[in-house]
Image (cartoon, helix red, strand yellow):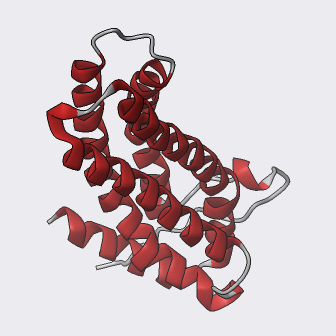
């Protein structure tokens, strides 16, 4: 049985972000699509609450809380693949204390903290939340959206292409295997 690796070739004459990605890196990039759609939805809802545009803020806030809770679960599954798979592999080459991996991990923690603060505070406030508190808490969702939008852009345009060039075919196979285990 012939073993195929998941590498996709060298950079060539195109820019870094234009190189084809191997299967596991392409999967990580593709996972951003539904995450971005969910982010767009909760950002729009949060922005309306912050702007006090919705007179029935309690229902709007409850819907936002549900959207953010569902999103946080999906984001956690995605981030785990990077935190425990891709980032440690790349750190062997470029280190972890400074540089791209340190930035990516910091942004993961920052987004988790913002989403966690929103969800914990929203849960504690429950149905008794006043409009001012709802606006303040919705601001955490807006901040998480901003952090993650920039974060995904950095991954797609810099980090994933860098990983494509940096990781060996064996490492790409290893990353692919780890990600497939999560599906089972």
Q: Nearer the viewer, residue 78 or 48?
A: 48
Q: Is residue 88 above or below residue 64?
A: below
Q: Is residue 32 above or below residue 95?
A: above
Residue 23 in picture, x, y percent from top left: 45, 59
Q: Is residue 122 left or right of residue 20?
A: left
Image point (58%, 42%), residue name? 146
Q: Is residue 64 left or right of residue 33?
A: left
Image point (30%, 60%), residue name? 77
In which quadrant is the N terminus drawn? Answer: bottom left
Image point (70%, 58%), residue name? 158
Residue 130 in picture, x, y percent from top left: 30, 29
Q: Within the image, what quadrant is residue 53 found in?
A: top left
Q: Nearer the viewer, residue 147 or 58?
A: 58
Whether residue 9 appears in this view of the structure is yes
Q: Within the image, what quadrant is residue 2 found in?
A: bottom left
Image point (81%, 50%), residue name? 14
Q: Is residue 51 above or below residue 166?
A: above
């Amino acid at each position: 049985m012939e073993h195929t690796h998941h590498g996709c070739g060298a950079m060539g004459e195109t820019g870094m972000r234009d190189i084809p990605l191997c299967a596991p890196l392409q999967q990580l990039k593709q996972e951003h699509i539904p995450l971005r759609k969910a982010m767009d939805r909760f950002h729009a809802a949060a922005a309306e609450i912050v702007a006090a545009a919705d007179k029935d803020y309690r229902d709007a806030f409850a819907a936002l809380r549900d959207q953010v809770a569902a999103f946080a679960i999906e984001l956690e599954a995605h981030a785990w693949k990077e935190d425990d798979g891709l980032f440690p592999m790349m750190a062997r080459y470029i280190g972890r204390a400074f540089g791209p991996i340190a930035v990516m991990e910091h942004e993961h923690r920052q987004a988790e903290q913002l989403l966690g603060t929103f969800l914990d505070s929203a849960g504690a406030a429950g149905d008794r939340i006043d409009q001012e508190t709802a606006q303040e808490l919705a601001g955490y969702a807006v901040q998480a959206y901003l952090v993650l939008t920039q974060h995904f852009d950095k991954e797609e345009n810099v980090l994933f292409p860098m990983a494509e060039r940096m990781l060996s075919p064996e490492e790409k196979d290893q990353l692919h295997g780890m990600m497939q285990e999560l599906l089972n």
